[in-house]
């Protein structure tokens, strides 16, 4: 029911990679309102954690009498049927919910209070490509209620606060010594004002024989439209509140994070270790903890004693990639990883385009290869095919050959460090060309050291 919408969205994002970005844009009226609300209502508790208000468009959402509890109960019973067929998933799912309770990220609601509130259905998403959490509980804040609206319809999204991933990677390539880490459960380190937590209720029981109980999620919740904004804004507010005169550190916290991933570095091992100690201390004051430290410098990792040299998967939202970008810490280079499943069933326009949009190349290094896929999209459109119509044999052959050849891209290695130091001369050289099918441009950096 949703796949055509999703494919259109994927296609839109795919083509948007071609659009210029990085220009400062004016905030919309709603984004300004969101920023003002955060500024005037955010507080900190005794542990230093941030307590935020949900940026709701209609402040009387709970009083509108939306029928959400019945929908949530029906969805819970459907989930129980699915879990009953998979014992392992059932155990893992219950474990995640139990963790919410034990970490006090969720509290039980008394019977008296359990009627008024907005209930979010929830379901499991299993991610086999994750190092840590493989089973994730996703809260469906986009679920429509009897008034035709969802919680996400009534939440303001807030402005984008972080740079594009490509800009963050470009800056990361400048550092001789690089460091990466991520924040443990970033969203859940930011508390929601208890006046707003009735908007984040769920139903749960670990056994279909037991009574269903109501709970409130009391932290910023994955699945709500405002979650990314609130978590990142709290992190950046921490830099403003705690960094004082250390402007370099404040700049790292504001500029070197892509969501919860830190991608930073320095010219020397000593400076990199200072970033590690300072940022760990400052983030700790806001309840944020960094984990999974990696670096190209073994000496630095020995000091941190928490590193490993496994490849780092560069993020792209929550989208499963066919062709993903990874960083190999041991060789300090970028490589491409391939997760190509065999073509299942007839090849349709929808399936081919869904595959093409999952080719992840934020810095455009594979443009000469990916342009072949883009011209294939043009051919699919010119053929006048419906979304689920099987493609003709000549286009199918072209697609199958292209797909098989993708495997050779995993042999490509691109050094992460640009050989940039303080005492070097830097020159940029740009080239462009066009044909009837496509146009392209490339910029090279030439670095000349003090030895010429």
Image: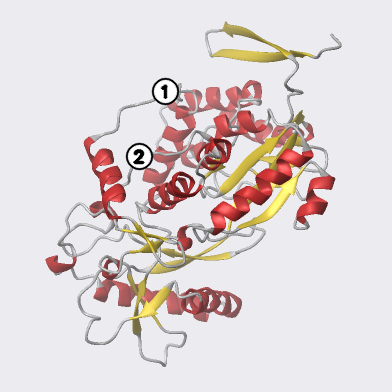
Residue at (57% x, 14% y) in the render: 440
Residue highlighted by disc 1: 23
Assess disc 2: are there few (<14), some (14-19) or many (≥20) residues with their C-alpha within 10 Å of its C-alpha: some
Residue 48 x %, y %: 45, 62
Residue ranking furthest to the right: 451
Tell me where residue 384 appears, x and y as whole percent.
Answer: 40, 28
Whether 218 is drawn above or below 379: the answer is below
Q: What x and y, as percent, mark residue 81?
A: 45, 79
Residue 348 shows in this picture: yes
SS label for mark 2: loop
Q: Which residue is mark 2?
A: 159
Figure check: 230 above or below 110: above
Is residue 44 shown above or below 330? below
Describe residue 403's horizontal placement relative to residue 408 as left or right.
Answer: left
Residue 338 can be seen in this image:
no
Between 46 and 82, the residue placed more toward the observer is 46
- Residue 327 falls in image quadrant: top right
Cα separation between marks 1 and 2: 14 Å
Q: Is residue 378 above or below residue 300?
A: above
Secondary structure of the residue carrying numbered label 1: loop
Q: Residue at x 70, y 52 (%)?
A: 293
Farthest residue to the bottom: give it. Answer: 209
Place of residue 385 in the rendered image (x, y in percent of width and height, measured from the top left): 42, 32
Closest to the observer, 14 or 141 = 141
Kindly check if marks 1 and 2 are in contact, taking CB atoms under 8 A apart as contact.
Answer: no
Q: Residue at x 53, y 36 (%)?
A: 247
In what quadrant of the picture does the C terminus appear?
Answer: top right
Q: Which of the two residues, 201 or 180, is positioned nearer the viewer here?
A: 180
Whichever of callouts 1 and 2 sits on the residue coming sooner in the sequence is: 1
């Amino acid at each position: 029911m949703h796949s055509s919408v999703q494919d259109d969205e994927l296609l839109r994002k795919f083509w948007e990679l071609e659009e210029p970005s990085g220009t400062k844009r004016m905030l919309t009226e709603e984004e300004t309102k969101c920023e003002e609300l955060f500024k005037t209502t955010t507080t900190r508790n005794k542990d230093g954690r941030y307590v935020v208000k949900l940026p709701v468009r209609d402040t009387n959402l709970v009083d509108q009498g939306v029928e959400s509890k019945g929908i949530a109960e029906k969805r819970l019973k459907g989930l129980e049927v699915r879990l009953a067929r998979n014992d392992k998933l059932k155990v893992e799912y219950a474990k995640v919910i139990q963790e919410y309770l034990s970490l006090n990220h969720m509290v039980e609601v008394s019977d008296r209070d359990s009627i008024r509130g907005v209930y979010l259905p929830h379901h499991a998403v299993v991610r086999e490509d994750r190092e840590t959490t493989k089973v994730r509980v996703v809260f469906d804040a986009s679920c429509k209620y009897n008034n035709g609206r969802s919680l996400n319809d009534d939440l303001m999204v807030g402005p984008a606060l972080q740079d594009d991933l490509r800009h963050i990677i470009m800056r990361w390539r400048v550092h001789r010594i690089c460091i990466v880490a991520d924040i443990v459960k970033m969203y859940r380190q930011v508390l929601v004002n208890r006046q707003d937590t009735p908007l984040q209720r769920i139903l749960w029981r670990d056994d279909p024989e037991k009574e269903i109980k109501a709970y409130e999620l009391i932290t910023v919740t994955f699945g709500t439209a405002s979650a990314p904004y609130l978590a990142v804004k709290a992190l950046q507010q921490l830099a403003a509140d705690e960094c004082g005169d250390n402007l370099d550190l404040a700049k790292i916290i504001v500029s070197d994070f892509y969501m919860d991933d830190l991608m930073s570095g320095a010219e020397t091992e000593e400076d990199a270790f200072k970033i590690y100690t300072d940022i760990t201390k400052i983030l700790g004051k806001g309840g944020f903890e960094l984990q999974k430290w990696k670096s190209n410098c073994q000496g630095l990792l020995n000091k941190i004693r928490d590193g490993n040299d496994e490849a780092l998967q560069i993020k792209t939202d929550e989208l499963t990639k066919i062709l993903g970008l990874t960083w190999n810490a041991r060789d300090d280079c970028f490589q491409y990883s391939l997760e190509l499943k065999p073509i299942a069933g007839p090849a349709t326009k929808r399936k081919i385009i869904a595959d093409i949009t999952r080719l992840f190349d934020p810095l455009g290094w594979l443009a000469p290869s990916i342009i072949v896929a883009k011209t294939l999209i043009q051919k699919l459109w010119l053929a006048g095919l419906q979304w689920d119509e099987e493609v003709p044999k000549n286009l199918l052959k072209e697609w199958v050959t292209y797909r098989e050849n993708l495997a050779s891209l995993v042999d490509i290695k691109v050094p992460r460090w640009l050989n940039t130091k303080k005492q070097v001369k830097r020159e940029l050289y740009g080239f462009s060309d066009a044909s009837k099918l496509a146009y392209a441009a490339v910029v090279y950096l030439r670095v000349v050291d003090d030895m010429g």
